[in-house]
Amino acid sequence: MKSMINEFDYSLPAYQTMFGNYGLTALAATSFEKTVMLLLIAVSRISELNVPPSELYKAMDEVNHLTLGRLITELKKRLNVTDSTASELESALKRRNYLIHHFFFAHREMLRTPEGAHEMSNELRPMRDLFVEVQKKIDLILGAVLQKHSLDLEIIDKEVRPILEGG
């Protein structure tokens, strides 16, 4: 398959804007995914309040290798989420998979013109908004779970950051 990268002048403002929006949307999708991962770990391991750090790192490393779809499936098994939240999670999963696996190829022809790049940019904004909104909901659930067990999110965040960063 011929590379798409040489089919357009990506120095034009429309392309820079679109790729900037793509990057922001991918960042929102990744942030949403990591928050789902943290919530899954919290509801899976919360009963073990004195889990040694090595065990926590092992649990995090295990879920860090799961796909977003698998993370969501496991989360729904362990946490009684509302139908609305389940629907939002599934919608965000579908949009994330489209963004990562199909977005550019689905718009191959549009990508050839600055006008098409502008339309693609407009398509990205609602996706990013969806990821941000669903993440806010997951953040609230995570906060409630941690608060219920008197756990400090800042301390946990500091402990898990190396794993979330791929270290």
Image (cartoon, rainbow, N blue to C red):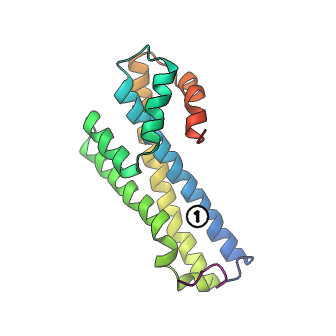
Q: Which residues, given as a range, are shown in magenta?
A: 1-7
Give the residue number, with chain letter if any, for mark 1. Answer: 22
Tag count:
1
Q: Residue at x 49, y 77 (%)?
A: 105
| Coordinates of residue 116 in the picture (x, y in percent) | 57, 82
Return the x and y of residue 135 as percentages of the image width and height.
46, 44
* Residue 39 % position (x, y): 41, 34
Q: Residue at x 49, y 71 (%)?
A: 103
Q: At 71% from the left edge and 82% from the top edge, which residue is drawn?
A: 9
> Is most of the magenta stretch helix, strand or loop?
loop
Image: 113 above or below 153: below
Residue 139 visible, this orientation:
no
**On the picture, is 38 further left or further right than 80?**
right
In the rendered view, would you say 102 is above or below 59? below
Work out whether residue 56 or residue 137 is closer to the camera in this orientation and state it: 56
Instruction: Name above or below for residue 63 compared with residue 96.
Output: above
Along the line of sight, the residue nearer the viewer: 166 or 38: 166
Quadrant of residue 154 within the rendered picture: top right
Quadrant assignment, res 119: bottom right
Return the x and y of residue 159 as percentages of the image width and height: 57, 26
Q: Secondary structure at mark 1?
A: helix
Residue drawn at (38%, 19%), measured in percent from left and top? 148
110 left or right, relative to 78: right
> Type of residue at label 1?
Tyr
